[in-house]
Image (spheres, grey):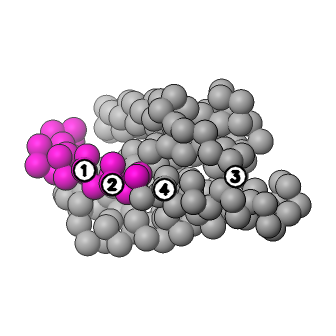
Amino acid sequence: MKSKKLRLMCIAGVFTAIVFVFTAYLHVPSGAGYTHVGDGFIYLAACMLPRPYAIFVGAGGAMLSDLLTGYAMWAPGSVIIKTAAVLFFSFRSNKIINARNMIALIPASILCIGGYYLYHSIITLNLISPMADIPGYVTQSVLSGAVFIFIGAAFDKLKMKERMGLEGDI
């Protein structure tokens, strides 16, 4: 029992670090924030780990990135948005790339685009100027979706869930 939890915590820690690196250091500044592909790794974690661990990956990786790169004002929004985005994906299948998880990219993208627009509107008390960041949010969603599909398909081909002991109901 303890070894299973320890394995899940270790895998979640690695995913959190990957999300942090791909969000904090491999991004392009855009508008008030930045565009990155870290969400693709959040989606991947959501398909591989039980929900509490995946939520930690999404919220933790995004929050650390915001706090440690000078965008601390975005951290509360990132925690809420990334936590909610994880909920669309399922880890219960042995395959990462399946119909449910492919469809989940749509509401997760809408949530991220709309959520960051709304959060930006709240912190600036302005509904108009945050619209300038929407193209960056759309780009981020499309690129993150592509990263998720590409790496998820590779993981499926390599049977990574089985190799990591993450197949089926954990």
Was residue 75 drawn as part of the magenta stretch in this picture?
no
> Looking at numbered disc 4 in the image, what kind of residue is underneath it?
Thr
Disc 2/disc 1 C-alpha distance (Å): 6 Å
Identify residue for label 2.
146
Q: Are marks 3 and 2 in contact (CB under 8 Å)?
A: no
Locate the N terminus by quadrant: top left
- Between disc 3 and disc 1, the foreground one is 1
Q: Is residue 138 above or below residue 170?
A: below
Identify residue for label 1.
150
Question: Closest to the observer: 57 or 140?
Answer: 140
Disc 3/disc 2 C-alpha distance (Å): 23 Å
Label 1 CA crowd tier, 10 Å (few <14, some 14–19, many 20+): few
Q: Which one is earlier in the sequence, the residue at label 4 or at label 2?
A: 4
Identify residue for label 4.
139
Was residue 159 drawn as part of the magenta stretch in this picture?
yes
Judging from the image, what secondary structure is the residue with disc 2 in? helix
Q: Which mark is residue 79?
A: none
Question: Closest to the observer: 1 or 121?
Answer: 121
Magenta part of the chain: 143-170
Residue 143 locus on image (x, y percent)? 40, 52
Residue 128 locus on image (x, y percent)? 79, 67
Q: Are marks 2 and 1 in contact (CB under 8 Å)?
A: yes
Left or right side of 137 for 133: right
Q: Are marks 4 and 3 in contact (CB under 8 Å)?
A: no
- Between disc 4 and disc 3, the foreground one is 4
Q: Which one is earlier in the sequence, the residue at label 4 or at label 3?
A: 3
Judging from the image, what secondary structure is the residue with disc 3 in? helix
Residue 120 locus on image (x, y percent)? 75, 56
> Looking at numbered disc 3 in the image, what kind of residue is underneath it?
Gly
Identify residue for label 3.
77
Q: Quadrant of residue 18?
A: top left
